[in-house]
Image (cartoon, grey):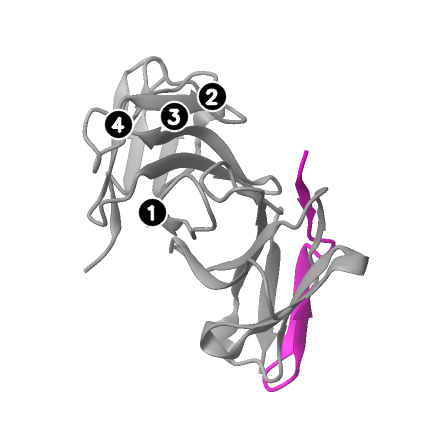
Amino acid sequence: AQSVTQPDIHITVSEGASLELRCNYSYGATPYLFWYVQSPGQGLQLLLKYFSGDTLVQGIKGFEAEFKRSQSSFNLRKPSVHWSDAAEYFCAVGANSGYALNFGKGTSLLVTP
Amino acid sequence: EAQVTQNPRYLITVTGKKLTVTCSQNMNHEYMSWYRQDPGLGLRQIYYSMNVEVTDKGDVPEGYKVSRKEKRNFPLILESPSPNQTSLYFCASSLSHSGPNEQFFGPGTRLTVL
């Protein structure tokens, strides 16, 4: 069965600093991988997705993620964090996106001045 | 505007009083799903539907019912709500149940069962 682990429950970064959120997955074949962001009181918005091809994926709001098969990872990065990036971030994996997406438990990002 | 809508957004109810949370999408998506979000547990799938009249259980279906009589609507029914169903609920849809398709999420329904 596929699963997702987000090792960091909370992360605090200073505004302008770089950010990396970790995501590890467990799945036998090549998974479909997603990062979603949930701002306070909002639904989930897709940041980026990986299905195949180039392992470095660009998303919205200046985010990118790199698929590393050898490490079973799909870490999310941003070179310079803005205060508006404070939110909860979810990594998700799907063997077939029409079936359940398995979500990680989320990483809560706090941005300090 | 392409979107998934849910109603109500907030609901406080009492144990045992039947309720329905509606979900509607205007993107002609085949696939729809309900999740619940609880602190420290992330999102867990309750039920999903691959098309009209086709529904199946997700990871946490106990205490819930769904129906899919029309392509655009996928209501979540709690016949006899209990306090452990207090949660934040999300409806999602995607174009197809096969192949890589992102899921679009509604704004969420915060349910409190007293």
Q: Is residue B10 left or right of residue B48?
A: left
Work out whether residue A39 can be spotted: no
Q: Is residue B85 left or right of residue A88?
A: left
Q: Which chain does the numbered disc 3 sit on?
A: B
Residue B67 figure quarter:
top left
Q: List the residue tagged with mark 4.
A: B52
The type of residue carrying mark 2 is Pro
Q: Which chain does the numbered disc 2 sit on?
A: B
The answer to whether tags 3 and 1 share a subunit is yes
The answer to whether tags 4 and 2 share a subunit is yes
Percent x, y of residue A69: 75, 58
Residue at 57% over, 50% down? A92
- Distance (Cα) linking label 4 and label 2: 19 Å
Work out whether residue A60 can be spotted: yes
Helix, strand or loop under label 3:
strand
Where does the magenta region start and end? A1-21
Looking at this view, name the residue that lies furthest to the right: A70
Query: Of the residues under marks 4 and 3, which one precedes in the sequence?
Result: 4
The answer to whether tags 2 and 3 share a subunit is yes
Look at discs 2 and 3 and give the one toward the viewer.
Answer: 2
Q: List the residue tagged with mark 1.
A: B95
Percent x, y of residue A8: 71, 57
- Distance (Cα) linking label 4 and label 3: 30 Å
Query: Of the residues under marks 4 and 2, which one precedes in the sequence?
Result: 4
Q: Residues within 10 Å of mark 3 (few under 14, many from 20)?
A: some
- Distance (Cα) linking label 4 and label 1: 13 Å
Q: List the residue tagged with mark 2.
A: B61
Q: Residues within 10 Å of mark 1 (few under 14, many from 20)?
A: many
